Image (cartoon, rainbow, N blue to C red):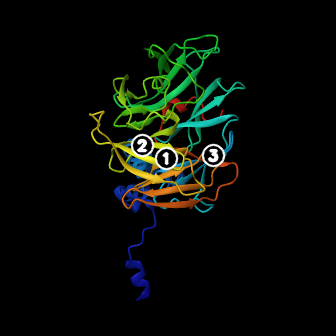
Amino acid sequence: MAATRAEEAPVITSHHQLNDDVVTEILLRLPSTSVLRFRAVSRAWRAITTRPDFLAAHARRRPLELIVAEGLGGALHAVPLDDGLDVDARTIRCLLPSTPRAAHLIASCDGLLLLEVRGHAINNVERLLVCNPVTRQWTSVPLPRSGHTLTRACGFYPHSPSGEHRLLFLTNDDERGGMGTSASHYVRSLEAGETRVLGPAAATVHMFTLTPRALQYRGNLHWVEHPEAEEAQEIVVFDTVQETFRRMPRPPVGSFYDATDLFLLETAQGMLAVAAMRWGSVDIWVMEDYNNGQSWTRRHRIDLPPPLRHVGWVVMTWQNALLSGYSPSDVAVLYDMTEKKVVLKQMQLRCTDHLTGHVFRESLQRHAFFDVQQEQP
């Protein structure tokens, strides 16, 4: 009788007996590294996990993570960007075991990381690198102009009409390598492998050593700290579809704030915001109407508890603002935007580690520009 029941029991002994929809749903829930391993199970599973619709759906399900850097040329790690922000040996995972010497992370886009490699002179960018840390694929990106020209990669964005990933450069027109007052914008398509000039920048531009950090919001790139924004004290906006520039007013924070004290955010409600940082406190200004530059409202004032008295950057979790000091720093502040409560978080970081402020979401999507060069350069 027992043998008869065993023979009658529906036992799945092969992946062929699983419905493709069931397999797809299971694979969508797995981490990226597991999906890569399961591609070797069969041709059918490989076909499922390489379909464009599967790759897009899998990327959407990946959690947001905050990148931790282990010094120049060191490893890159990631921690879950959730409301608890538990940063210790249990939650930190390795993204890349190493990066090229003198390279540091400057942007993240669609599961891709953009790294800048500088030469002996602090102003001199030798090359740019793009990598997918999941697939360990790398490619070099040539600069728009050769020689001693000062160049900054200001933005990394998806161009929705073409499906391409593009880089926006601001390049000094002075061939001698000086700071100069004249500059031009260039765009580089990674897929097409072509660079073109967009046109001259504002009449007077004072190039600086820092690489401007952009916020992508509503299909546009926004900068509060940018060579073209310094004189007018405005937010620079770049339409990534039309590839044109415009300006919008900053919140009325007062003249005592420098651009380095302001940080752009997107709130959990999908609104553009600016964190105005000063010693001992941070104000959060929200733009109530994106089409009205005068609609800035101060929603929050965050009093910073010691030992964190000055903030280097701010990012948003689901309902909290995460504030961290300049590196190296092993403390952060979580501010509950609903309850308006402050929690001081102690993070277990090594002395060489620091939170970068860059947010990352894994992606297994294939990119043709990686076909030429697969390994770390």
Q: Which is more toward the observer, 370 or 5?
A: 370
Q: Nearer the viewer, residue 280 or 358?
A: 280
Q: Is residue 16 above or below residue 117?
A: below
Q: Distance between the residues labelled 1 and 3?
A: 13 Å
What's the residue type where badge 1 is placed? Val
Please tell me which of labels 1 and 3 falls first in the chain. 1
Vertical side of 285 occupied by 14: above or below: below
Horizontal arrangement in the rendering, residue 114 relative to residue 122 (left or right): left
Disc 1 to disc 2: CB gap under 8 Å: yes
Q: Which of 56 and 276 is in front in this view?
A: 276
Which label sits on residue 314? 1
Residue 4 occupies quadrant: bottom left
The amino acid type of the residue labelled 2 equals Leu
Residue 204, percent from left and from top: 48, 15
Q: Mark 3 points at which residue?
A: 327
Q: Where, quadrant-wise, is the C terminus in this rendering?
A: top right
